[in-house]
Amino acid sequence: MIHEFETRDGVMYIGGKSAVEIVEEFGSPVYVTDEARLRENFCRIRDAFSKYIDTRVHYACKANTNLSILKILEQEGAGIDAVSIGEVLTCLKAGYSPNRIMYTGVNVSDSELKQVADLGVMINIDSVSEMERLARIAPGHKISFRITPGVGSGHGAKVITGTKGAKFGIPLDEVIGTYVRAKDLGFDIRGIHAHIGSGGQSVEPFMDMMEILVELVNELSGLGIDLEFIDMGGGIGVPYQPQEEEMDLDELAMNLTDMILEETNVKTLVLEPGRYVVCDSTVLLTKVNDVKDAGTKKYVGCDAGFNTLIRPAMYDSFHYVALANKMGKACTDKFDVVGPICESGDYLAHDRVLPDPKEGDIVAVYNAGAYGFSMSSNYNSRPLCAEVLVCDGHADLIREAESIEEMWRHQKVPERLR
Ligand code: LLP
């Protein structure tokens, strides 16, 4: 089941605050996060694993890097999975200490590696090339390796990362040799990492991946390379369809930790959930500007399109939608919910039954917290939208909507064109 929000007199309430009032106060479109739900999600996943094994939850901040959201998770004790120097510096700004951050870049430059190493952040190495370069840049640095387990999982082909031949990680047959080389190079080797993909909803691929990690850990231990942690990556999916079942988190945690504790000397598990932590804490509210009957189709035209939420256009992802000011009202017809971008691929939802949508209504797009704002763009010269955080009925602006002028701020017009 997807996470439902409270309804009062036909109006959606998020964190105790009316969606209609939020749009009146902060404008549209706007991403709205329920702080209590965010904290709950983090604690639920941490507790599911930490009851079995020493667990470090490194929030994969690529899902959502808003400083206030990072700060809330910092208060809850999260660590960070960062993929770029930008994410590392953002998390430092949010109050994380460098030793709570792990950097897992892919195809990164020497200068970025140097910046990350100088900050004292552990580096999860993605390739032999990266290892050799890092050995020159930051000898003896604390590291782990991302390996390619040959197992994939995810909501679609574009987000499966762990299969053989993927661009990510050390190929399986090179892993042992690479660790031996890293030891010879004098690195401070801490762990092993794999990430099979994003949005998977079944336990089996995680088990298959862990079997491979466990085998490698034991082989390395036989060679005198003992690891502190196994990092299982992220990728734990959440339901997006109203009736979809949740993955059994306890089954996953119990089986994975069992395998680690029974078969290895490793005492710590690291996990890197992004989606699981932020996804259903946030809805995107977008105002209906236009309603059109095109004969073969009816359209609800909103002020958010794939510039604001790209997941439907990019992955064909399903996001549940409702009219936030007409909750529980009888549905009248089927509509496509579309945006203001001049492409036919610009949509938020296809063929949804909605209760007589009219201009001025507010569409709530569910499960928008993960890879929503963080993937938004200025396409069609539309400014990035605002973000709001709600707690106990009180709403705070946590990101101002961008202005048109701000979209121009990095452009330069050469003298001869003026
Ligand atoms: N760890 C690593 C190394 C990753 O590459 C990722 C996601 C995660 C953790 C977090 O995965 P999660 O728990 O959020 O599934 N833009 C796509 C998702 C791309 C995920 C990329 N890597 C989407 O909107 O579905």
Image (spheres, grey):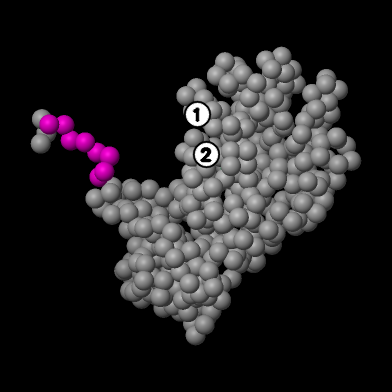
Ligand 1 within 8 A of label 2's CB? no
Q: Indicate the position of residue 53 as horizontal and vertical percent values.
A: 81, 47
The structure residue drawn at horizontal position 57% and vertical position 45%, both measured from the top left corner, is: 96
Q: Magenta stretch: residue 19 in it?
A: no
Gap between marks 1 and 2 measured at Cα: 10 Å
Tell me if residue 339 comes above or below residue 56 in the rendering. below
Q: Secondary structure at mark 1?
A: helix
Location of the N terminus by quadrant is bottom right
Ligand 1 within 8 A of label 1's CB? no
The part of the chain drawn in magenta is: 408-415
Determine which of the numbered discs, if any, sits on residue 193 in the image: none
Does residue 224 appear to the left or right of 411 in the view shown?
right
Q: Indicate the position of residue 265 as horizontal and vertical percent values.
A: 85, 35
* Type of amino acid at the residue the image marks with label 1: Gln
Determine which of the numbered discs, if any, sits on residue 88 in the image: 2
Return the residue nearer the eye: 371 or 326: 371
Q: Main secondary structure of the magenta part?
A: loop
The structure residue drawn at horizontal position 46% and vertical position 76%, both measured from the top left corner, is: 18
Q: Is residue 66 visible?
A: yes
Snapshot quadrant of residue 187: top right
Snapshot quadrant of residue 174: top right
Q: Residues within 10 Å of mark 2 (few under 14, many from 20)?
A: many
Return the residue nearer the eye: 88 or 75: 75
Does residue 255 appear to the left or right of 184 in the view shown?
right
Snapshot quadrant of residue 173: top right
* Type of amino acid at the residue the image marks with label 2: Val
The structure residue drawn at horizontal position 56% and vertical position 76%, both measured from the top left corner, is: 6
